């Protein structure tokens, strides 16, 4: 099963450098990898898209990830954008749930539980589609 909750290492702080995508300056330290560089969030990253709002309304009321949408709208937009494609949806969940970069702190418990419920809903949908 996937591990979404914060580990005991969550108390340790990892410093990430925000990098404006239009900036041509290199990161402060040459030892920092590209995985630790982030672009500044766009307006679309901070709000739900129309497609994400529509996706949210299409979900059963008890399964709607309201904390995810509120706290991580960029992520909710991304899940909503791929929800119709089972392969892409699974890839997004894999990327979220498996720490391939190392040092990720995880999600707050409420968001983690919403992501787990969404993943279960996605898996149920796959089973239904395979039985049709």
Image (tube, grey):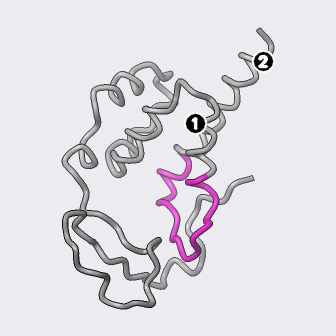
Q: Residues within 10 Å of mark 1 (few under 14, many from 20)?
A: some
Residue at image position (29%, 63%) is 39
62, 10: nearer the viewer: 10
- The numbered mark at residue 130 is 2
Tell me which numbered mark, 1 or 2, is placed earlier along the sequence.
1
- The numbered mark at residue 89 is 1
x and y, in percent, of residue 85 in the image: 57, 27
Q: Residues within 10 Å of mark 2 (few under 14, many from 20)?
A: few
Residue at image position (45%, 38%) is 65
Is 26 on the left-hand or right-hand side of 75?
A: left
x and y, in percent, of residue 120 in the image: 66, 35
Query: Is 132 included in the stretch rendered in magenta?
Result: no
Residue at image position (30%, 88%) is 28
30, 59: nearer the viewer: 30
Residue at image position (53%, 24%) is 84
> Are dots 1 and 2 in contact, CB under 8 Å?
no
Q: Which residues are magenta?
A: 95-114
x and y, in percent, of residue 43 in the image: 19, 47
């Amino acid at each position: 099963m996937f591990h979404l909750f914060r580990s005991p290492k969550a108390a340790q702080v990892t410093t990430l450098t925000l990098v404006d995508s239009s900036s041509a300056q290199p990161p402060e330290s040459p030892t920092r990898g590209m995985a630790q560089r982030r672009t500044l969030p766009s307006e679309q990253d901070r709000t739900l898209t129309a497609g994400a709002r529509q996706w949210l309304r299409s979900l059963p009321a008890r399964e709607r990830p309201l904390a995810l949408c509120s706290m991580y709208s960029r992520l909710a937009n991304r899940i909503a954008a791929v929800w119709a494609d089972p392969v892409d949806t699974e890839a997004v969940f894999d990327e979220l749930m498996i720490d391939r970069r190392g040092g990720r702190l995880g999600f707050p418990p409420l968001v983690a539980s919403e992501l787990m419920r969404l993943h279960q809903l996605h898996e149920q949908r796959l089973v239904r589609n395979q039985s049709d």
